[in-house]
Amino acid sequence: MSSENHTQVSPEDAGNNFFLEGPSSIGKSRAEEAVRLLGELNESVGGVADKSNVEDLLEKDPSYFTSFSIVIVHNLEPKLLDKLSAFLWSRESHPPLVVVRSAGFLAEFFIQFHEHTIIESHSETAPSLRIDKAFPALLDYSLSLDFASMDSTDHAHVPYVVILVRALNDWKEAHEGRPPQTYPEKTAFKNAILAMKNKIDEENFDEAESQAYRCWTETTVPSDISSLFQDPQLSALSLDSPPFFHLLEALRKFTLEPPHTLPLTSTLPDMKANTDQYIHLQKLYKVRAEEEKETFKAHLTVPIDDDLIDSFVKNAHALKILRGKRWGGLDADQARLENAIETSPKQAAIHLSLAAFSSLGTKQPGVTPTVELLTAEAQALLPSGAELPDDFSDYVGEIARAPTADLPNTAALLGGLVAQEVIKVITKQYVPIENYCTIDLVETWTGVI
Amino acid sequence: MATSSQNTDWTGRYFHIDQILDTPGPRTDPSFLAGDGVKDFLRKQAKILVIGAGGLGCEILANLALTGFKDIHVIDMDTIDISNLNRQFLFRSKDVGKSKAIVAAEFIMKRVPGVTVTPYFGKIQDKDDDYYMQFNLIICGLDSVEARRWINATLVNLVDPENPESLKPLIDGGTEGFKGQARVILPTITSCYECSLDMLNKPTAFPICTIANTPRLPEHCIEWASVLEWPRVQGDKKLDTDDPEHIGWLFNVASKRAKEFHIEGVTWSLTQGVVKNIIPAIASTNAIIAAYLNNYFMLIGTEGVYSYTFEHEKRDDCPVCGGESLELTISSEFTVEQLIEILVEKQDIQIKKPSLSTPTQSIYLQAPPQLEEATRPNLTKKMSELVPPGGEVTVTASTLPFSLSLRITYN
């Protein structure tokens, strides 16, 4: 972690920063003081205070910035920001840039990045159990059970997955190989399951009935995954391509073969069952999942770490590819800007207020930013004739009254949000934002454009 | 009273914060006393109580101190654990074992000159109405539903329509992994904490038959060790989830059971997680929630940044702040015991050990022991034998300073 600041702690700084020690820090290097006090929070984090100047570094040694995994800037003056963001955008291998702006109760932040692939997105959707396309060992097992003469305790503890596979098989045999399709058929199917009960309180059959839809809903490749197969990276695959895309190509090939689904999951949700039957079922899934993983691996054309393959296959239903935009893209695209004003007026108002403030500071340095000046500047950022969002004065007024206020509460909230996003970007877990996040602390409100 | 902060101020100290105190913004309330009025109140008169000095509490205390509040009180009944240090940034390794409230107070006072933080190492229930009356605002960073219900009910009961000073705004926040919420409660005016009880996620409860006979998941094995095996082997000895030796015992016992049933996945951390009902906490979410009527703010940070700010409405039949009775329809066959089960389970009621009475008789009292014994035979009686249709039943519990009024109808 590196904190870059060539300034000294001012009396004002000492009053609003918890990681400075009040008056005793005044006059010392702000970077050194902050790094020292932040460092106390975690002994295993290395902190470096760099007192160089961003402008100098950009000029003489820009490789300084590319030595980091991610760069975060706050209220950086526009000229330097444009230079830094352009430099970091110039190569795909350069780190992402988090741009943060704030004044008083208003703030926004944006992450500039090229491409971000996610395996562990921690999606809330569960992978399919493929009950409608039961693998051979599962089908055989369900057919091997003699429900009629089974021990009554066992009967009440047959997992619903097995009940459904069996019920579906029996139905298809009586209906020319078709699953239940019409509403009356589906009702009949559900009733047939309940009719299998020996006693009223056999919850496993109730579970099966409530999950019956899994029998007539075809398991296919989810559309958000199949759309990844169109990714341009796949048609330009080379030895240097990131492992994620080699894995994705292997996955695409896997889905071309029957049963045209993603590789089977080895994770079963909990369900009403006794231990033996549940563990047995779990084993069937585990064995089959391993087999499918081997089939998947055979499609790979480059060597890839086993752990990565494991993780990819496990999360095949939850993969994501994000494509970011460059800083300044929104402001340069008049159509996008106008659209934002129409569909997200509040967010656009916050963004435009901060943009106007930033640009005014460059054009007229030292001049007090009044509501009139800021509004005129914001208007100038828009195509001629375009209207500012409704209630724009509510937002620009906040900046006019507190242009240089770095409030502790705003900093805390902003710091928290940015830290979360940075964690997501670096760990490649969960899903980072792909757009601007605007914040209004008067109404305690956040919104994205 | 705060110590004289003029001695500890320096020129420029309030440069940032004064920009919003000296000048109102476009949406500032017209009654805002910009300038000396508000600064005087903030720095010389305001008295704030922070309940909880944990993840949220640390963030709240730091923000309040830097905002300029000079007289802050903090209550916390816990001591510092090593696992707190990843986010409760007022504590260091040397503080492990000490009172959170005391250490937090000392840290803040040292870091922010001129602030007085008065700690109390104990329970919120130890303090009386007079104590809570002295504050202008109460902010909670608690980790238990029960404590929140208690302070909420206490503040609602404090309100005396003749005395405007008795209305103490309550700000409550909570976080869970990447998710969090913050809300403002104006007792008797806006919705209160009890009004939204049904919004809480039901805690995971495994059926006892699964625990005892048909475990399938590692969690089932751990619950078996803690709920069934511990009492059987250890007798009256109370399980202390903070004692590593107790956790070790549970871990070993759970592992053995898991092995027996061919279940994988029992680990030390899962054992701790299950018995302590641990919900993962991350520092960044705490920072966000501490920092914000529309009185309810929800944040979900798992996919992008999603938040929702809305007005949560008061419930007329809220047992704490509403006036009306709660209508409850039960079967005419229902026994007193069955009604009690509903009161424990129902999402919008959730009273753990309810005592029931009507205007003319005690139906079932949980305490004291003699009265419990005397009213115990009523448990198996039908409610319809004791209470007429449309009759009122008053429900009380020792943990909650309020009573719930039920109007019973039968179907």
Image (cartoon, rainbow, N blue to C red):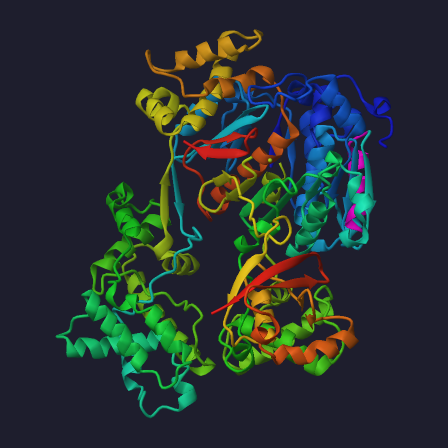
Please check the rendered image and state whether residue B106 is part of the magenta-colored stretch, yes or no: yes
Foreground residue, A210 or A6?
A: A210
Quarter of the rendering containing residue B365: bottom right
Residue A135 seen in this snapshot = no
Is A47 situated above or below B95? above
Image coordinates for residue B292, horizontal then vertical, percent: 60, 35
Q: In the drawing, does residue B207 fall left or right of residue A249?
A: right
Task: State the extent of the magenta-drawn residues as a range.
Answer: B99-113
x 41%, y 86%: residue: A154
Is the magenta region chiefly helix, strand or loop? helix
Is A374 situated above or below B391? above
Quarter of the rendering containing residue B388: bottom right
Is B135 situated above or below B367? above
Residue A268 seen in this snapshot = yes
Q: In the drawing, does residue B342 fall left or right of residue A129?
A: right
Image coordinates for residue A232, horizontal then vertical, percent: 26, 41
Foreground residue, B156 or A90?
A: B156
Image coordinates for residue B327, horizontal then vertical, percent: 54, 59
Which quadrant of the rendered structure holds the N terminus of chain B?
Answer: top right
